[in-house]
Amino acid sequence: MAYRIPRGTQDILPGDSEKWQFIEQRIDDICSRFNYSEIRTPIFEQTELFARGVGDSTDIVQKEMYTFEDKGGRQLTLRPENTASIVRSYVENKMYGWAGQPVKLYYTGPMFRYERPQSGRMRQFVQFGVEAIGSADPAIDAEVIGLAMQFYEEMNLKGLKLVVNSLGDKESRKAHREALVSHFEPRIGEFCSDCQERLHTNPLRILDCKKDKDHPLMVDAPSILEHLNEESSSYFDQVKTMLDEMGIPYEVDANLVRGLDYYTHTAFEIMIEGEGFGAITTLMGGGRYNGLIGDIGGPDTPGIGFALSIERLLMALDTQNVELPAEKNLDCYIVALGEEAKKRSVSLVHELRRAGIKADKDYMDRKTKAQFKAADRTNSTFTVVIGDDELEAEAVNIKNMETGAQEEVPLSAFITTMQKRTRRKAQ
């Protein structure tokens, strides 16, 4: 039987894994500058956490979750998103009592959704996201948006467009919900079955329907901005003012909704414009979720965050021909000539690695010419030759592969010489 990878998943092989590592290093760097700390949550949680946190009426909960029963009869789900998990951890670990508020967290890890696989959309995919919990200041909204924009800009992507909207508070959402029901109900039979089900459970999601996006009722559907109360309108104005102060351009889109039930007030997406990216132009999305912490048993605490797909980022980089460092170069490759030299090379390569130097040697019993070819394939900066003559002289021959310069160095000074040449420090 030939085993194949499950549909909607991928192997990230050497040559590509270095690109992922580079992106992850960029994530760690920018989050450090913004004073966000890493959090790591379990890959599976109680199913009820997502049903309650994400929302029973969402496609994620109704159609896309990987749910199973463990040997104890508990219903568990592979996480389809991470905000609910982080909020669970926030409540369980009483982070609301920590001295440093707001609690500013970031994560990178796999999520799972049973969707039809397509370009930029996998069943197992990796998200980078941030959550800032504990502050109702519009400035933290602007900070979170600014972090996302700066990350994409530092990845050298062009044609970025920030779209923002307000979903209002509970009072505003209720008024908007009633207006949507009145608007769509007389002709709801003309819409898809999903929209018909959502009419009285979550009519806001009708605005995000891909099947009925061209229906005439979509054009003049009631806008949330028309139903914002004074408090919600003022909050949105302050967020926009903060973005103006930061010099971040944006567009207001009254039809922007997010696919999760927990969002309130600020909602935003970053899109990419330009040819070659296909139908999926949205790179990431996020928003404020002031009621979520209370909904899953914690104190009434405001929060805001975003999540972005690493796969979709890589696709955008590829479309714009942005090259990422993917080569894994060695500092030193040892070519051993003769049986005694092969034995000596084992200890030499070990000493090099202990000294902080990226080193390797031949393990395939190759001939001399083949060993030099292997060294070339590793893009090694230096090739070190040791044979019978070198062993007798207690020396090695070091060749700089960039300049072609060669020098003979005593074995007693070999490690320190390589540290100086490569500027490495002992581990």
Image (cartoon, rainbow, N blue to C red):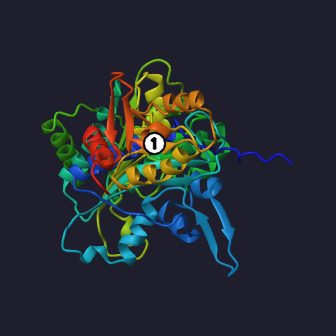
Q: Position of residue 392 (x, y in %)?
A: 43, 43
Number of marks in the rendered image:
1
Q: Residue sitting at 29 percent across and 34 percent down?
A: 154
Is residue 56 depicted above or below 22 in this figure?
Answer: below
Q: Residue sitting at 71 percent across and 48 percent down?
A: 6
Disc 1 residue type (three-letter): Trp
* Residue extending farthest left: 245
Q: Where is residue 233 in the image (x, y as percent from the top left)?
A: 23, 47
Q: Position of residue 199 (x, y in %)?
A: 56, 50
Q: Can residue 309 be seen in this view?
A: no
Q: Label 1: how many residues lie within 10 Å, few (<14), some (14-19) or many (20+)?
A: some
Q: Position of residue 426 (x, y in %)?
A: 29, 55
Q: In this view, does 9 lie to the left or right of 424?
A: right
Foreground residue, 272 or 236?
272
Q: Name the residue under label 1.
A: 20
Q: Residue sitting at 65 percent across and 40 percent down?
A: 117
